[in-house]
Each structure stands twice: as C-alpha cells, then as structure tokens.
Image (cartoon, coloured by chain):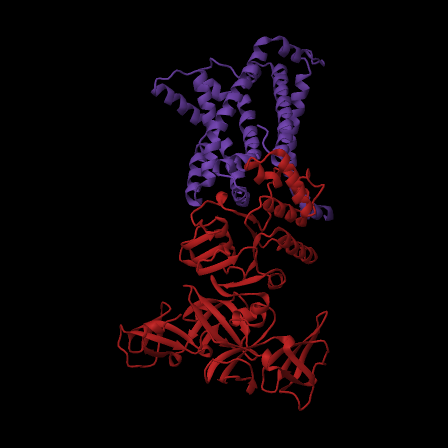
Amino acid sequence: MKWLNKLFTKRSSWSIPYFLFLLFVVVLPLVLICYYSFHDGTTGDFTLKNFEKFVSNHEAANTFIYSIGIALITTILCIVLGYPAAYILSNSSLCRSKIMVILFILPMWINILVRTLATVALFDFMRLPLGEGALIFGMVYNFLPFMIYPIYNTMQKMDHSYIEAAQDLGAGPFTVFRKVVFPLSMPGVMSGIMMVFMPTISTFAIAELLTMNNIKLFGTTIQENINIGMWNYGAALSLIMLVIIFVMEFFSDSDEDRASNEGGII
Amino acid sequence: MKDSNFIIELSNLSKNFGDKVVLDDVSLYIKKGEFVTILGPSGCGKTTLLRILAGFGNASEGEIRIAGEDITDVPPHKRPVNTVFQRYALFPHLNVYDNVAFGLKLKKVSSDEIDSRVRKVLKMVGMTDYEWRDVNSLSGGQQQRVAIARAIINRPQVLLLDEPLAALDLKMRKDMQMELKEMHKSLGITFVYVTHDQEEALTLSDTIVVMNEGKVQQIGTPTDIYNEPANSFVADFIGESNILNGTMICDKKVRFMGKEFECVDVGFGEDVPVDVVIRPEDVYIMPHSDAGMFDGIVQSCIFKGVHYEMTVLTSDGYEIMIQDYNAFEVGQEVSMIVKPSDIHVMVKERVCNTFEGKMIDSTHVKFLDTTFACAECGYEGGESVKVEIDFDKVELMDNKEDGSLVGDVRFILYKGDHYHLTVRTEDGDNVYVDTHDVWDDRDIVGIKINAEHIKISKSAHDEMAQ
C-alpha cells in the first residue's frame, strides 16, 4: 500500500501516462520504421536493398528533388508574403492587430482537407487549370499562417528601446529596419521556415487534390508504396525524409543561434 | 527669454496622455556644459520630459530649442542629442565594437577614423580589450559603460541619461557616479540626467530640477535645494527633514511646537500660517539643561554609521528627528537648540481644501463629482459656490464603500504630531487630509466629509487657484 501511495503522490509519476503514450505512438513506430527499412519484406533478412532501390530508381529520387524544390518555392513565397504582414501586424495598435492576427490564423481552424477542397472549387469556379500553379497556391495558402505567426511573435516581443536607440544614434526609418528590426527578427523567420519547409515536403493530400494526382510529391510516393503493401520500401523512404529533416533542423538551429547573436545570415 | 548661453530651451511644455496630465507647463533653460539633473519620484513626468527632448514623444503644447534651433517637430534621428537608456538597449546582435561604432557608421565616417574613435571612447569608459565581446556576456556595469561609449562617440551637443545607474548595485553606482562626473568635465558636453535618487542628484549636478506631478517644484544648485527648499514637497524629498506647521508672527519671529523662535526670514507678513523645516543635523541635542530652547525625551536611537539618528518627543507632544555624533539613551531627558539660520520657513501652498461646487438644493452641494449633504447655508440650488473643508475634518475610511468617494494616498508628510496626506480621487483631484492614523503610500481609502464641516461661501472664480 505504501508504494502505491508513493506512486500517486510523487509528481514525476504523473508523467507516466504520457511516457507510455510516447513509447507506443512515437518511439515504437520509429523503431519499426528503422527495422522495416533495413529488412527484406519477403525473406525478413537484414538488407540495404530498399535504399539501393531509392538511389537507382530515378522516379523516387526525382520526386524527392522535385518536392524539395516545391517546398523551397513555397517557403520563399511565404516569407515574401508573411514578413511584411507580420511587420505591419506587430506595428499596428493592440486592439486592431489582435483582430488581424485572428483573421490570419482563422484558416487554421478549418480542416486542411476542407480548405484544399475549397481551393479546388475556387479554381474550378475561376476556370483556372489545376496543376503546379494551383499546387503552390494551395501550399502557400495553407502554410502562410505558420510563417506569419512566429515572425509576428518575435517582432512583438522585440524591445522597443532597440528601435529608439537606433533612431537616437541617427538611423532613419529604413535604416532602423535594415540594421535592427530585420536582424533581430531572424529567429522568427528561422522558426517560420522550420514550420513551413518541413511539412511541405511530406504533404500528399494537397498535391493529390490540387493537381488531380498529376504531380507527385515525396509524401505521395511514400503513401502509395505503403498503400500497395510495400512496407519496407515505404519505411526506407520515410527514414530518408526523417534524416533529411533532422539534418536541416540541426543546421537551422545553429543558424538561429548565430542569427540572434550576430545578426542576419540571409 | 532668449539668451545665446542656453543650449536647451524648453518653453511651456505640456503633455497629456488622454485625460492624464503628465507634464504641466514646464519651462526649463539649460546652459551649455551644465550637468542638470531632473529629480522626482516615479511618475512625476521626468522620463517623459527626457523622451520629449530626445524626440521619442511629442509635447501636446510648447516649444523645444536646442542651440537656438527649434526642434519641436524634428524626428529623433536628426536631433543633436544622444541618449543613454535606462536598460542600456545595446543591440544584442552586435558585439561591443559594432554597438559603439553604430552611430559613426551611419554617418559614413571612414573606417580608420571609426577605429580610432571607438578605441578612444572604449578607453575612456574603461572597456579596452572588450571590442569583440558579445554584449550579452557583459555584466550590468560593463553594459552601462558600452552604452555610454555608444552615445558619446557621436559627440552630441547634449547627452541625455535616463536613470543610467538605477540597475547597478550600490558600490558600482558610487564608482560610476564619480566616472560620469569626470567624463562630464573632460567632454564639456551638456548632461541632462534623470533620476529619482536624491543623493545621486546632489552628488552629480550643477543644477537640480525637482519635479512632482508634472510640475517643476524648484530649480537650483544642490546647496540651494537642500538648504532653501521651496516647499514642503522638496524639503521632504531631498534629504531628511522635520516639517512642522507654524505661524509667522512677524518678521524674524515664528511660532511652532507651541513656542516662539527667532529666525532669519522676513517678508511673510504677520500671523501667516507657514511650514517650518528643520534638518535633523541642525538640531543640537544635550542632556537636560536650562540652556535648551525646548526639552524632550529620547524615544529611539539608531546608529547610522557616521552619526546616530534619534527621535525625541518634545514636552509639547511633537516628534523631532535629530542626527548627532553622540548617542543619547532611550528615555533620557534632553534639551535642544536650533540656530535661527537653521529654521527654514516656507509659505504654505494651501491652508484648507478648496473646491468649486454647485448647490443642488439648500442642503446639498455637489463638488468632486459627488453630492454631499451640507448645513443650511442660504444658497439656492444651481448656484456656483466655493467649498472649503479643513484638512483635519476630512475622514479617511479603511473600507472604500464607507466613504462618499474613493481615492488613493499619494504623498505622506509627517508633521511632528500628525500626518498630512495627499489623497488623489479617482477623477484625479487632490484632497488634503490631516490625520493621526498611519496610512501607506497607494492605500485605497474611502473619503468621508461630514455635513457640518463643509463650509460654503460665494464663488469667486479668481480665488480658485487650485
């Protein structure tokens, strides 16, 4: 009875349910992905065959490169559209900016599939062709809030005295932005990139709906392989993507440190 | 008032934030090369004044001139001033060198000159060899030095300092005070320094501007301000003081604590109520003797490092604070002497609460946006009247629901045997109260005034000074 009492009163034991959850839906699947990707689907032996197939199979590798390209374009468009929006939001009066932020964030409250289907309907209505353009439009539309919010957040928290100090030292409005506001907002841009670039590589629903399945993204390839029962190859592709994301995260983390200490890197 | 000697001329500046008056008709003329300190409690408008000088806020009314030029509407980056910010505001993405060189780089100064000037100012603030350090890795004192270097490198005509030492510990603050004073001497720039620390102001300045409630209370040299405070606020804020109610009987004769004293002040008139200020170090204390001007019993005695601080209860029931090198035991009977020149007499700003009011009917009067019952006074409803209430007739209630209106305690003055409080109502009007009860700063109180204490007379608009 004593140990039971201890178990319930100790604060750290309250995290046990979450750890169990983590173990079964995060750690275990990861282990399984690793296991499947290094094993032969039919024989069950250890093999690197799945990875060889990715390298030799040009279709998968090309899709991969294409996905990264689309993700890059989406990210850049999101920065170009989102940065000014965030800047204006952070500078407008409190009450109005709150409403504006909600307006920007509002699309996120609606299910991504519903939103994408609506985009398809919109393109149909305006007699615009579905395809690459529609795909990028859909991606930017869906991920823009994820870019605006972190940038807005960094700018909001920025100490106004930095701007005053720059003005005091003789900087006009544009110089203040170039020399102080922009460098100091880089951490926000970095986390915006993380929030937009990573998910865009792996989405498949948007690509399927907005290109009528004509353009394949990497996420689609993985989904297809798993759908047709090629668990091991699908797992290998997932693992490749995981590693790429991990590497990019690692690099942008160190970028972020540099950005906040030394200034912009772009 | 135009004089080429003045580098800064502030004329009739007023500033409102909505309904709140932050600066009320402030005029200030500062000579070239002066070290001017703007001193006052928090919320007195001193930082607002500095920000208007720097260009970060616009005055609602008034004019600012620097070196003869009207800069009232000039944006901050075009003003010949630089600021040292309270929390330093060093750019976190730049190192020490780039922070200091920021202003010069904007002016397109050649990199050789930037280099030599950065080294020179860093040497001046004692930060040589820190050029490449990250500003976040510096201590508070070091960051402050870099902030000063960043400002003075631009050779401004005026250096504005916004409580620059507030975040430093005592020892560091003393050292930096000396260094600032040295710097001011060697640079020859006009310094405008904002602080709430009276000791700092007395140590550093050529001229002190004491502010309260958005108004300039007194301008003068540190000795003037200390020895001849213009009113009871200045006397209380600068240094320790005994402030007592008194009556000027005639020239050179003042009555307080139930006794008549000789003093040196003249020209107040006869039988005029005044405030009397005596600095605790100006009271001579000795064991009971007939030579004393008044007697008392020591209530407390605390050692303060150099001197002892004692409270003495006089035989007439007034508490006097005394500082002396000799300690007297608690309970000991003592006698005191005050030199006539150490008795400072000040005109009372007011002798009772005065409000403009309007009769509702013959037994109700409305003032301070509240209707009070009053005694039958012979005035009709709708008539404008003058309402007077003695300080000691205003009652303060713990429970704000018990009063007819609500206020908070803004300023407490101990007058030897009672407290004189300034209570600010929710509408921003001041009610002055004499009380024996102890209240704290910012206490929320209910204000109650009994009908028989409301004195009503004919309204005379030219008498409404307040």
Name chain A's colour: purple
Residue, x 69% and y 16% (percent of image)? A38
Q: Position of residue A111 (x, y in %)?
A: 46, 29
Residue, x 48% and y 43% (percent of image)? B78
Q: Is residue B302 above or below residue A184?
A: below
Numbered marks: total: 0
Along the horizontal axis of the image, is B434 left or right of B356?
Answer: right
Q: Is residue B72 above or below residue B292?
A: above
Q: Quadrant of residue B116?
A: top right
Q: Position of residue B362 (x, y in %)?
A: 29, 78
Along the horizontal axis of the image, is A145 left or right of B303?
Answer: left
Foreground pick, B288 / B311: B288
Residue, x 34% and y 20% (percent of image)? A126
Along the horizontal axis of the image, is A117 left or right of A52?
Answer: left
Q: Quadrant of the N terminus of chain B?
A: bottom left
Q: Position of residue B456 (x, y in %)?
A: 34, 78
Q: Is residue B57 visible?
A: yes
Foreground pick, A148 / B65: B65
The extreme bottom residue here reads B290
Foreground pick, B299 / B344: B344
Q: Is residue B375 above or below residue B192?
A: below
Name chain B's colour: red
Q: Is residue B363 above or below residue B74?
A: below
Q: Quadrant of residue A56?
A: top right
Q: Is residue B45 visible?
A: no
Q: Quadrant of the C terminus of chain B?
A: bottom left
Q: Position of residue B110 (x, y in %)?
A: 60, 34
The extreme front residue here reads B4
